Image: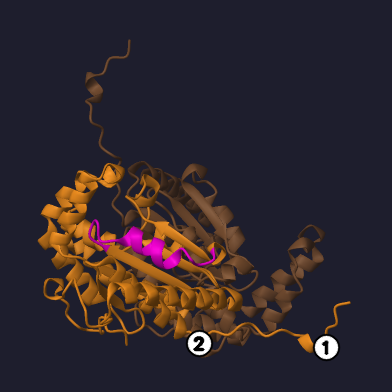
Chain colours: A brown, B orange
Amino acid sequence: MHPCQVPTGETVDLNQIPTRDEVIFPISKDEGKKLFEEMLEEIDELQTRLYAEGKHRLLVVFQAMDCGGKDGTIRNVFNPMDPQGIRAVSFKRPSSEELAHDYLWRVHEHVPGNGETVIFNRSHYEDIVAVRVREIFLESRWSKRYDHIVNFEKMLADEGTKIVKIFLHISKDEQKQRLQDRLDEKDKNWKFNPGDLEDRALWPKFMTAYSDVISKTSTAQNPWHVVPADRKWYRNLIVASIVIEALTSLDMKYPPVDFDPESIVIE
Amino acid sequence: MHPCQVPTGETVDLNQIPTRDEVIFPISKDEGKKLFEEMLEEIDELQTRLYAEGKHRLLVVFQAMDCGGKDGTIRNVFNPMDPQGIRAVSFKRPSSEELAHDYLWRVHEHVPGNGETVIFNRSHYEDIVAVRVREIFLESRWSKRYDHIVNFEKMLADEGTKIVKIFLHISKDEQKQRLQDRLDEKDKNWKFNPGDLEDRALWPKFMTAYSDVISKTSTAQNPWHVVPADRKWYRNLIVASIVIEALTSLDMKYPPVDFDPESIVIE
């Protein structure tokens, strides 16, 4: 089990979990960067095998507070993959057509097919967390969704989808620093959204909502991972190691060929 | 509760349930046809309200043996509805892209949105029944699907979809008669599919599989109805009465207007 994995039934309090770690990879940043390059090669090889075998499906779900590093992680860890077999899906505020359906409708559409890797940048977990913190629905409505989501993911997994759920965990101070950078650096101004400050003011409520959702939806089959994400290079290493562990567990093989390669003469 | 509804937890044996009934509507065929016309008007009025209110979603699922009357029922009971608010979806053998995903993927895409009525002609229930009877997967795989489907339908219902599941129950003799008609009447020849005879030979296995699936997936929230369907005019009456009961239970209202109609003068 990966050290960041949340065991089934464990009650998580994110306020008690460090956002900076030095134990899992006790190495320097330079050593970390070298290791990361090796890991990317391994991921590339594993994903090629996933695509070639065409049997399993990989779904990686990212959730985080604003500035948590979702975009950066996806760019760093997944961009080396062959774009033929990978898709990143970003879930924004739902459209009116999406709101006219159950909240899993737009999510289900995008789940991976055989041999595919799909990355969710935000996900159906917003339909509990954001809805709860911003008080969009009553608890009687969003509280039913824990079970819906556990059941939905169980069905996906039973039918052949490997699901990896990752929460990028940063401190409130780290968020302040990253928001300030967006204001200070002209090329980053476009990333700043005044609405992020409203969510920042709700930090304690978000921590409670995320703690609950991670506690209630981390299963042995479809576990959550809480990744210490204050240091970007370190976060990338952890996420890469989680993805490698998940793909390795699938025990994938290149598909057998129905001819004897040695008997073929190319004239 | 409708007399054809299967109560939660009841173990159904279709071999013991009559395919012809005279108790629910103790009337003649002529009287039945008159009553049916009145019911169609009521359905039309209820569906207009569903569409206008734009709050609920209606999903009607039909399953039956070949010649069970799915097409005829859909044509008779639902065609008078306004096509703007209704869609019929026929699930055939899955495509290779569909087979590359979980079996609920193609189904979820077609569920109704707010104000919509969707009719499923066959459904995700084939992914248990047909898969089991034709021995396409091992039991370890299809047996997990009872829970998947119960959970999937629960989520849809929690989120605002009224689900009505109807099994059109005909006798093996009635099927023989209808298949013979397709051979005898030249204009019906196109409906005859030699593959139907293979399924007919598996009749006892289908009855067991349908009995199990109906027993295990009929819930108070999303019940099954077993409709005696040997007589077509009578079957239409029963199905219409089920649809009326379902729509009436939604207690729908036309949306309020934000002006006083009496104060408006059209010059």
Res B96 visible: yes
Q: Of the residues shown, which amino acid type is indicated by label 2?
A: Asp
Give neighbour class at mark 2: few <14, some 14-19, many 20+ (Cα, 10 Å). Answer: few
Mark 1 or 2, which is nearer the eye?
A: 1
Q: Quadrant of the N terminus of chain B?
A: bottom left
Q: CA distance from mark 1 to mark 2?
A: 29 Å
- Nearest the eye: A26 or B30: B30
**Numbered label attached to residue B251:** 2
Residue B257: x, y in percent? Answer: 71, 84
Q: Is residue B95 left or right of residue B260?
A: left
A31 magenta-colored: no
**Mark 2: secondary structure:** loop
Q: Is residue B66 magenta?
A: yes
Residue at image location 43% in from the left, 73% down from the top: B37
Chain hosting mark 1: B
Start-end of magenta stretch: B64-82
Question: Is B31 displayed left or right of B21 in the figure?
Answer: right
Chain for disc number 2: B
Between B266 and A99, the residue placed more toward the observer is: B266
Asked if one can make out residue A217 in the rendered structure from this viewpoint, the answer is no
